[in-house]
Structure formats: structure tokens, C-alpha cells
Image (cartoon, helix red, strand yellow):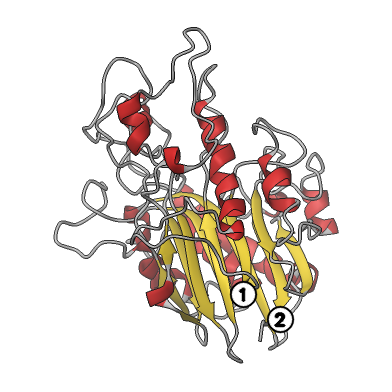
Amino acid sequence: MSHVSNRAIGVLVLVGLLAACRPAESPPTPPDVLRIATYNIEDVRTADLKNPAHPRLKAAAALIQHLRPDVLLINEMTYDQPGDPGYTPGDPEGQNARRFAEAFLAVAQADSLEPLHYRPFMAPTNTGLASGFDLDNDGRAVTTVPTLPATTADGSPPPQTPEGRAYGNDAWGFGMYPGQYGMALFIREGLTIREEEVRTFRLLPWSRMPGALRPVDPETGTPWYDDAEWAVFRLSSKSHWDVPVHLPGGGVIHVLASHPTPPAFDGPEGRNKRRNHDEIRFWADYLDGAAYIVDDEGASGGLDAGAAFVIVGDLNADPDEGSALGNPIQTFLLDHARINGDVVPRATPAGLAAYPNLDPDDTAEWGLRIDYVLPSENLRVREAGIVRPDPAAGGLPVSDHFMVWIDVDLPR
């Protein structure tokens, strides 16, 4: 039997496990409750999404069909565009969220699961977009997209290559090709995205932020990014989105989505640690209505006072441990007056038993809480949790992250 067939059987085992543990892992959602989730599926590429039999994406869809969120952010899904190895010239851009919704989520992955029908949203990100600058200061500005290995037969992401890292380190956000590690938002049928009110902040220069943590070479005391680079260097490694969602009953909830760069893979100058800090700080400034904030359409200002919101995504920082600089999660988010930082999703007893070396609130296999669904203080939270499939059950590993979710009363 082929390796792929073994993996496919693993998907069925995983689905059976999910069906058996449905009450413990995710309580049924009452009609007046909104379930919001975030999931970093890990390096989903266009070629993967064009293959409806892709084993890892089928397993991911099974997990999502089990949890059945109303609002779902997926991190690390390629924004398809020219330069992406899987992109077909002439195709419309940004179709990968639709592909996942139609070919995977709208198809029941087992007899025990039901399809999900979502309205997808994607927007461009900074990942893998050549800057034209030597941003890693290695003496060359790499602007040519390298040839990269394809996804493996079992659907696992291929490893990074030296050529890919060299290109990605000089891009506005790390990516070995344009659009890699993008974001996608999925809204269930019955909810509506207010398209005309969506705000994105992909192009906002980091230097506009008062007190920005501009990296400095500690050996020379000179800025890591020279003045020409710093003037145009983008704060967001991917993007920051404010997506207003219209709810039954007339309420609106703002989905504030991002995926800051990891506070690692740099040097003594700490350029990624500083960027991660300020990417997280952006949300606090947005809630405070900071004057420097200008969206990609030129509109200024932050989120209206009193608006209901959730901050979602892989923020790559833990409030208690890890390499983040200055504890930005606690400082800017958990302690913010407009955020209910007391809501801490935790794994179920079964999830704890499956990963005995992890803390109850860890959302990544390497032992950190980095994925968040943070509600505004004016939302009433019913339930919260982390989905940790048991690897001993024989299912296909989907990601090194776990899906995180909360249930809130529908805002009116």
C-alpha cells in the first residue's frame, strides 16, 4: 500500500476520533451564539488547493467541519498571484480561499460530518513581495523568485531552501515567493462581510508609528535599515485587516486579523523581535484611535469606540514565555481596557493527555500560546477551547498549530 493511501486511511481514523469526542471538544452552538476560530494550517500552497484529494487539506477540513465555526481565520494560506509557482497566468488573483471553501469545506469529509458553506475573503499580503532592498544586510538585494521544491506526496510542506530564504529575507515580509503565508477569512452563510467598510493596513510604513522600535546594529550603533529603507519599510509582515461582519439581528462584529513575524530568525539587532512587538502594538493603537494610522485607501483613524470586535490570528508571541520582546501580548492586548484578556482557551482533558508536555493554554506543538481569539470587553463569552487531535489515533498531522475557538453571544 502506498504512503499516500496510508495517510488517507489516517484521515478516516482522525474523523472517527473527532466524531467520538464531539461533545468534549466543541459544544453544539446555540442559534444565538457566534463561534469564532483561528487556525494556522501551515504553508498551504496554490498547487495543494487545486488538488481536491490533497490529504492534509482533507484532514484540516475534517477538523473544521467538526468544530463548525461561524467565523474562521486561516493563517499561512498562499494569496495566489503572479510569481506564485502554482499560479496560472491569466487567472484572477486571490482565489485560494474560494478553492478551499468549495473543494474541501463544502464537501463532507466523512459520513459523520456535514459540509460547511462559507463566504471567503482574501486580500494581498506583504509576504514574498520583493522590496528591491538588501533588508538582511548580506550585501545583495535578491529580487528573483527562486525555483522551489514541490509539496511532498503526503501533503506535508516542503522544507525551506537557502535560495528561498535569501529571497524571503529581502522581501517586505518573509516568503519564498509572492503571497506565501497569506491569510484567508471564512464567514458562514447567513453572515455578510461589509465589503465597502473593510480596511487593510498592508502598506502602512513602520516609521509612521510614534516610538517605533527601529532596529539598530549594536556593534556600530547605526540603524539596521538605512533612511531610504526605513521611510518605506512596511510595518505588517503580512497585513492587518479590519473586516466588519454583519450578523443576524443587525449587529456588527469587527474581525481584526493579522499574523506578525516571529520574534526570531534575526541577529543582535533583533529586527524581527522589534517588528513583532510593533505589529502587535498596532492593534492597541487602532483601538485607541491613534492619529498616525492610515489604511491602504488613505483613510485615517482607528476603530470606533464601542464597536464589538475580536482580534484573531497567529500573533507569534506568548505572554508568559518565549522570545518576544517586552511581552507585547500582555502589555498591549491582554491588559487593554477594550479587550477581555481574562478569556484563556484551554485544551480539554483528552487534549491534555494527548500532549502531556504542553501547558493547557499552549496552541503550538513546541509549547507556546501564540494563536489567539481575543474578544472585546463588550462581548459575552460562553465557551472557549483548543482543538488538539490525538496523534496516537493515527490521523494525518495537519499543522504544528492547534485550532483555537471561542463562543460569544451575538451582538445586537
Q: Nearer the viewer, residue 81 or 381?
A: 381
x, y percent for residue 411: 67, 82
Q: Determine the image quadrant of residue 81.
A: bottom left
State whether residue 245 is above or below residue 202: below
Q: Residue at x 61, y 57 (%)?
A: 288
List the single residue furthest toward the left: 90
| 364 sits left or right of 79 in the view | right
Q: Secondary structure at mark 2?
A: loop
> Callout 2 environment at 10 Å: few (<14), some (14 to 19), or many (20+)?
some
List the single residue furthest toward the front: 291
Give me the disc on residue 68.
1
x, y percent for residue 147: 25, 35
> Callout 1 environment at 10 Å: few (<14), some (14 to 19), or many (20+)?
many
Residue under pointer 2 = 29
Q: Residue at x 78, y 55 (%)?
A: 351
Q: Amino acid at mark 2?
A: Thr
State whether residue 247 is above or below residue 341: below
| 255 sits left or right of 66 in the view | left
User: In the rendered view of the protein, which quadrant contains the C terminus?
Assistant: bottom right
Q: Residue at x 41, y 32 (%)?
A: 160
State whether residue 66 is above or below residue 371: below
List the single residue furthest toward the bottom: 249
x, y percent for residue 118: 47, 77
| 383 sits left or right of 322 in the view | right
| Camera sees residue 113 | yes
Q: Amino acid at mark 1?
A: Arg
Q: Determine the image quadrant of residue 375.
A: bottom right
| Camera sees residue 116 | no
Mark 1 near mark 2, Cβ–Cβ under 8 Å? yes
Q: Residue at x 59, y 75 (%)?
A: 253
Q: Secondary structure at mark 1?
A: loop
